[in-house]
Image (cartoon, grey):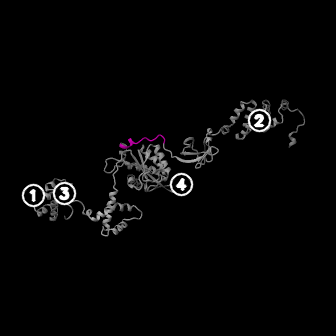
Amino acid sequence: MAGKPKRMSQVKQLLRLHKQGNSIKAIARTLEVSKNTVKVYLEKVKQSSLSIDALLDIDDFELEKKFHSGNPAYKDLRYEQLKNNLNYYVSELGKKGVTRQLLWEEYKEGNPKGYARTQFFYHLSQQINASNPTMVLGHKPAEKLYIDFAGKTFPYTDPHSGEVVQCQIFVGCLPYSDYGFAMAVRSQSIEDFIYALRCCLEAIGGVPQAIVPDNLKSAIIKASRYEPTVNRALEDLANHYNTTIVPTRVAKPRDKGLVENHVRLIYQRVFARLRNDRFLNMESLNKAISKLVKKHNQTRMQQKPYCREELFLADEKPLLKKLPEKPFELKYYTRLKVAKNNHIYLAGDKHYYSVPFTHIGQKANVIFTRTMVYIYIDHKQVAVHPRSFAKGQYTTNKLHLCSTHQYYLDRSPGYYIKKAEALGTKLHQLIQLIFNQDRYPEQLYRSCEGIFSLRRKTDPQMFEKACQIAIDNQIYTYTFLVNLIANKRVSDQQDQQNNQPLPIHKNIRGKGYYS
């Protein structure tokens, strides 16, 4: 049969003309085909077990099978020999350094009369395509959010230093509506990645059932085909927003084809339009990006009578889960030992946080965010503190201290004055005068402690008189009181003598004596 296979509608015309008694030459002239073509088809009819009427009743596709049973090359003995080894050749291509040329050379060594290089490559390519077919994925509204970083960066210029800062561009899209989001961040670090994702969820005004990141280093610690280990920060975010993380498969670019296409559109509709603009900070850059992304979402799509935003608002946004009341805060994890002063030391902040003294020496699991510090021991929360960035300082909950240390924390001028008021009038007056001095209160606490201790060891009347003597002489020290009592100078007689005025006499030196 010369030339290309004929249409079955034309073959049926050939059969009808033959049935009507037309000659081969007449049939060829009528159908404008060669006589050899007519002969070949009539010969196939003779070889068939069906009559012409039966053949005419068969549908075109089934009739084509009767006349064209396939490419003769696939009935070749060489193909039968190659077919059994095609899967082996495909698997060998995945090994490092193995090429098609090498496989063909090995094939020819075992089959000298086998296919030439071109035919071998053709059948190998057919096998690769057949073993790795593509599939069109259908997406449900509000089901997934694809996220990735664009490969290219976009700069802004710091007006103070003149430094050109290259920003990473975060891109997200909802596959059902193809509704997109983009923003610039400083890097692909965990902090910037989580911040950008949080802004993306807030921008779309809801949460999808799943978030699908690429295997970017910020999101995936270890890429695995079946059980990817998701970064803990991303897990915390997913739990906070009541969603799940489903990373794309390793080395499967088709899994992220939609977001890659969205990145391409961002290049065309954002990067290209801003290429000649100059920005002085990230805020102005993100403002310009947001404006162009909004325009992109409002542009009518090809072959569809609506834009991305219209489809998103109509079918997708109502199905998104609500955002939580509080925005997500990135959590940091560490394990620290409780020191003898019942505090843990957060080295990053150079700050100390208290833990109940009963846990001294134990290991504590510490979770801290930008605003709070949570301390756990034996899976129980034992302390919560607001986070402080004051270096070298202590954040202490008084209830975490032992009774002795609590007592020392309770000390204050008011504490000692109130305590003295309950113990005696003169003592109360003396303590008030002690704190009226122009001295730092912490320096006077030890004197007060000594005075209270002396009172417990001394006769109350004698102690009251000693306090009065100290007040009269304006000497408000613990040492003075101890000397009065130890030298037995506190007596009624001595008290009266101290209260008598000095006698009048002429033995007085005037100011001239000292001039």
Would residue 189 be seen by someone viewing this image from the given angle?
yes
Pick whichever of labels 2 and 3 is earlier in the sequence.
3
Badge 1 vs badge 2, beta-carbon distance below 8 Å: no
Determine crowd level at label 4: few under 14, some 14-19, many 20+ residues with C-alpha closer than 10 A. Answer: few
- Badge 3 amino acid: Met
Percent from the top left, x then y, of residue 89? 36, 62
Instruction: State the SS at label 2.
Output: helix
- Badge 4 amino acid: His
Query: Gap in Å between the C-alphas at discs 2 and 3?
Result: 124 Å
- Badge 2 amino acid: Leu
Determine crowd level at label 3: few under 14, some 14-19, many 20+ residues with C-alpha closer than 10 A. Answer: some
Pick whichever of labels 4 and 3 is earlier in the sequence.
3
Circle 2 or circle 3, nearest the eye = 3
Q: Nearer the viewer, residue 440 or 365?
A: 365
Instruction: State the SS at label 1.
Output: loop
Pick whichever of labels 4 and 1 is earlier in the sequence.
1
